[in-house]
């Protein structure tokens, strides 16, 4: 089934052409990732598909039987609504059935309840309510009564993401799900859960992401937007890179042939007689087409800099027995670490574990409770924070960078200009002389990154540098950091980025504990998974003995004398009686799989499922006993 067809779309802003005469189709089941430099028109294209922007020319046809749903960077919400109310603002039949059911529980009206139960069955809303709860739990949203206005920016994004996934699940119509950077503000566990959820879900997806592992796991088609064109690639991110190289090689070959022909035709043009025949006029027209191809600029600035960095002394940075708490929350406990020259350290952990606090303590922005810090006299920090860029609205990009200096120092006394350095980070001449206020959000992030690096620090500290950066910029940044001779600390949830750059991991594991691990991020995750798998297998052996003594809740074992339950409580008891046998069956099936499995990755997955089911059963059994008491 065809969802979207577009023919010859063109869109410009002033003199800047974003894309010209591009055509594409989206079919049911497609999972498409869009790859492009910031400012190339990704977000504009998504808005055109949503009907929020109009193309200058061309046609977009969206199947009348589908619904287009967007997860955007800007979230609209009513601040006085709590999380549960915000989730229930969805407009779909299953959600309406859920609303009516909850209303019937409050009123305890038998007629309303009968009607609500019938609607719940018709629209399969029982499963939807369970899935909504699971999605919110996985995204670490536990307080459903919290008002939206009290949530942090990251929490709001996660609630909005949960709502979008539930909305997609609730729609009986065919749905095109459009997601713009969905992994921002998610920790690694959440990203991996979302990755698994979308890869298995029967959805049609159009995705913009900088997370290459996420892209590979979820999508099988890549749209590349470059030089006003749209190129389609079937396969992985690696396949896209291979295709891109082949295309550029073919283009260079075509240009070489055109340049040879251009030189010959130029001689003819200079010798041509004034009287022009029809044949000569045709040849003149061909000459100008050849000239256009011959003068195509395919030169890509490559980052091959020999840095002239401020010398690092023998003392770099040493933390001794650092403690830090906020009230009752312990973030750092007796933490010691000595940073080495040229070391590239990745810091990982859940949101709120204290990662950014450690960065602030290192730079003297935040006091610590106990311990000491020794910073080398030659250290010059370069800090890329999440707060964003501070600038004057009408200041031009080139002038903003030149405030630091006209040139960037290289080895052997050489330099490159501010403009050349900007080009290395994908700012073309036109963008360099544009006001900063006219840049896209991603371009401002890129300029912020440029501003930090251009100051030529010898100790870089990056706090979530990959958020909102496009893949071409990330590639440039990675090449820069791989050549960087100074010390580096990175806090990031981007697994691909961390794997490529860091050689050492400090993992915040909660309660002030920081694990020191030598290796890259994936190696740390694998080691952690193995440890958890071994621990869980030991616990699993005890589960059958423990559960044999748990009484099976049923009407036969219920007390003969008890107070009368309310209508709502009786309904809840009935639901628990139905749910527990299902969970017991699921648990038995997983235990059987565990006993026959030798693959540690599968054991880890089964163990996690078993733990969730056991926790849910325990909660239901406790509630059942409360209702029976």
Image: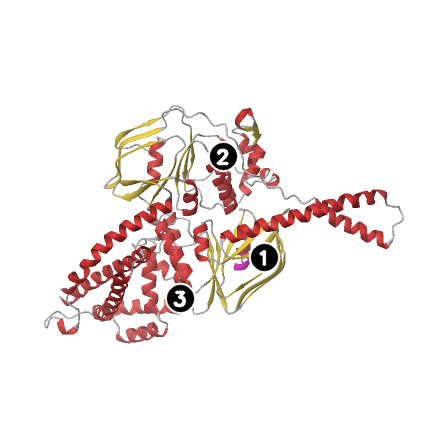
Task: Tell which circle, 1 or 2, labels the residue nearer the N-terminal end.
Answer: 1
Name the spot of residue 429 as percent of width and height, x first. 61, 39
Residue under label 3: 170
Categorize mark 2 by other alpha carbons within 10 Å: few (<14), some (14-19), many (20+).
many
Name the spot of residue 558 as percent of width and height, x first. 13, 71
Against 558, is 266 above or below? above
Question: What is the secondary structure assignment of the residue under circle 1?
Answer: loop
Against 235, is 407 above or below? above
Front residue (pair 572, 551)? 551
Q: State the quadrant of the C terminus.
A: bottom left
Residue 50 counted in the magenta span: yes
Quadrant position of residue 415:
top right
Question: What is the secondary structure assignment of the residue under circle 3?
Answer: helix
Residue under label 2: 451
Residue under label 1: 54
Front residue (pair 530, 286)? 530
Quadrant position of residue 487:
top left
The magenta-colored residue range is 47-52
State the CA–CA distance, disc 3 to disc 2: 45 Å
For this view, does 469 lie left or right of residue 291? Answer: left
């Amino acid at each position: 089934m065809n969802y979207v067809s577009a023919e010859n779309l063109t869109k410009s802003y002033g003199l800047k052409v974003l894309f010209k005469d591009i055509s594409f189709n989206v079919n049911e089941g497609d999972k498409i990732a869009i790859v492009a430099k910031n400012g190339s028109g990704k977000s504009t294209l998504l808005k055109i598909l949503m009907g929020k922007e109009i193309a200058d020319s061309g046609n977009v046809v969206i199947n009348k039987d589908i619904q287009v749903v967007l997860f955007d960077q800007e979230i609209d919400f009513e601040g006085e609504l709590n999380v549960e109310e915000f989730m229930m603002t969805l407009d779909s039949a299953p959600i309406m059935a859920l609303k009516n059911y909850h209303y019937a529980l409050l009123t305890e009206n038998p007629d309303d309840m009968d009607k609500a139960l019938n609607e719940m069955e018709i629209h399969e809303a029982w499963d939807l309510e369970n899935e909504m709860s699971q999605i919110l739990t996985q995204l670490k949203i536990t307080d459903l009564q919290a008002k939206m206005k009290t949530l942090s920016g990251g929490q709001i994004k996660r609630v909005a993401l949960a709502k979008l996934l539930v909305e997609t699940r609730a729609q009986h119509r065919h749905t095109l799900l459009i997601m713009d950077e969905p992994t921002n503000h998610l920790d690694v566990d959440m990203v991996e859960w979302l990755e698994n959820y979308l890869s298995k879900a029967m959805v049609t997806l159009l995705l913009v992401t900088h997370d290459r592992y996420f892209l590979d796991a979820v999508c099988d088609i890549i749209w590349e937007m470059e030089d006003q064109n749209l190129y389609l690639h079937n396969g992985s991110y690696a396949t896209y890179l291979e295709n891109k190289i082949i295309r550029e090689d073919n283009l260079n070959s075509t240009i070489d042939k055109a340049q040879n022909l251009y030189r010959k035709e130029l001689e003819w043009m200079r010798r041509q007689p004034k009287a022009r025949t029809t044949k000569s006029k045709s040849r003149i027209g061909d000459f100008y087409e050849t000239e256009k191809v011959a003068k195509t600029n395919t030169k890509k600035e490559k980052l091959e800099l020999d840095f002239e960095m401020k010398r690092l002394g023998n003392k770099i940075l040493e933390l001794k027995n650092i403690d830090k708490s906020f009230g009752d929350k312990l973030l750092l406990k007796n933490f010691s670490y000595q940073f080495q020259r040229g070391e590239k350290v990745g810091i990982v952990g859940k949101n709120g574990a204290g990662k950014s606090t450690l960065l602030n303590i290192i730079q003297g922005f935040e006091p610590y409770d106990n311990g000491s810090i020794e910073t080398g006299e030659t250290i010059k920090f370069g800090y890329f924070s999440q707060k964003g860029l501070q600038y004057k609205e009408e200041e031009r990009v080139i002038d903003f960078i030149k405030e630091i200096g006209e040139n960037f120092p290289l080895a052997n006394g050489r330099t490159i200009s501010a403009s050349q350095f900007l080009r290395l980070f994908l700012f073309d001449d036109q963008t360099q002389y544009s006001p900063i206020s006219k840049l896209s959000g991603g371009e401002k992030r890129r300029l912020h990154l440029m501003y930090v690096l251009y100051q030529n620090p010898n100790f870089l500290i990056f706090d979530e540098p990959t958020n909102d950066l496009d893949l071409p910029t990330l590639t440039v940044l990675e090449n820069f950091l791989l050549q960087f001779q100074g010390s580096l600390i990175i806090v990031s949830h981007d697994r691909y980025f961390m794997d490529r750059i860091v050689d050492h991991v400090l993992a915040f594991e909660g309660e002030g504990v920081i694990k020191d691990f030598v290796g890259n991020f994936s190696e740390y995750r694998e080691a952690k998974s193995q440890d958890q798998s071994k621990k869980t297998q030991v616990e699993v052996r005890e589960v059958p003995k423990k559960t044999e003594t748990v009484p099976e809740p049923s009407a036969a074992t219920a007390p003969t004398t008890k107070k009368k339950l309310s209508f709502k409580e009786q309904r809840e008891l009935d639901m628990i009686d139905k749910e527990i046998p299902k969970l017991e069956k699921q648990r038995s099936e997983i235990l059987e799989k565990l006993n026959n499995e030798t693959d540690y990755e599968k054991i880890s997955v089964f163990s996690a499922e078993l733990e969730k089911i056991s926790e849910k059963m325990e909660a239901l059994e406790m509630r059942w006993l409360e209702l029976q008491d």
